[in-house]
Image (tube, grey):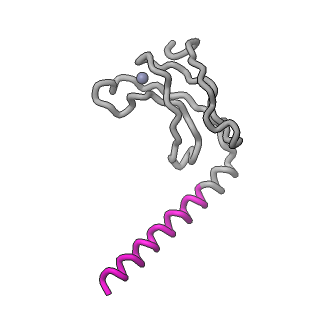
């Protein structure tokens, strides 16, 4: 068992804006409150999770703390979100192409 039972409580920063923010953060194995991150995987686009503060650093590579914050998505939500993301990415590619066009010609 790891990271269970011990929690730190902080004041939510975006409470008034109506954005759902965690009021408590689970503690990970490194004795730090875990950080709220956003997943952009195809399976969970935009879904937030708690991850180790030191994730990705060489020193703490052993810590693989992971815990979802947002509830699981319905298949419909996933499809809608992925469609939106695809559109945003396509727009960006198009914009870059236009910039390159103006730079060359
Ligand atoms: Zn950690």
The residue sitting at 33% across, 24% down in the picture is 60
| Quadrant of the rendered image holding ligand 1 | top left
Q: The C terminus is located in which quarter? A: bottom left
Where's residue 95, x and y in %?
Answer: 45, 73
| Above/below status of 76 relative to 91 | above
In the rendered view, tell whether residue 43 sits above or below residue 11: below
When the figure is inspected, residue 78 is found, relative to residue 29, above or below; the finding is below
Magenta-highlighted stretch: main secondary structure?
helix
Residue nearest the viewer, comparing 75 with 50: 50
Q: Residue visible at 41% across and 72% down?
A: 96
47 or 104: nearer the viewer: 104
Task: Give the residue drawn at x 56%, y 48%.
Answer: 45
Range shown magenta: 82-105
Residue 28, given in percent of the width and then of the height, sits at: 47, 20
Q: Nearer the viewer, residue 13 or 58?
A: 13
95 inside magenta stretch: yes
Q: Residue 36 lies in magenta, yes or no?
A: no
**Which quarter of the figure has residue 32?**
top left
Give percent across and percent down for residue 85.
55, 58
Pinpoint residue 40: horizontal percent, then vertical percent. 51, 47
Counting the numbered discs, the total is: 0
Residue drawn 56% across and 18% down? 8
């Amino acid at each position: 068992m790891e990271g269970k039972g011990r929690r730190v409580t902080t004041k939510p920063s975006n409470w008034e804006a109506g954005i759902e923010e965690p009021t408590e953060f689970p503690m990970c194995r490194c004795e730090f409150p875990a950080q709220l991150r956003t997943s952009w995987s195809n399976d969970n686009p935009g879904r937030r999770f708690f991850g180790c503060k030191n994730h990705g650093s060489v020193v703490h590579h052993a810590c693989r703390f992971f815990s979802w914050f947002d509830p699981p998505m319905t298949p419909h939500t996933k499809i809608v979100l992925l469609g939106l993301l695809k559109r945003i990415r396509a727009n960006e590619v198009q914009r870059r192409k236009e910039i390159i066009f103006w730079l060359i010609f």
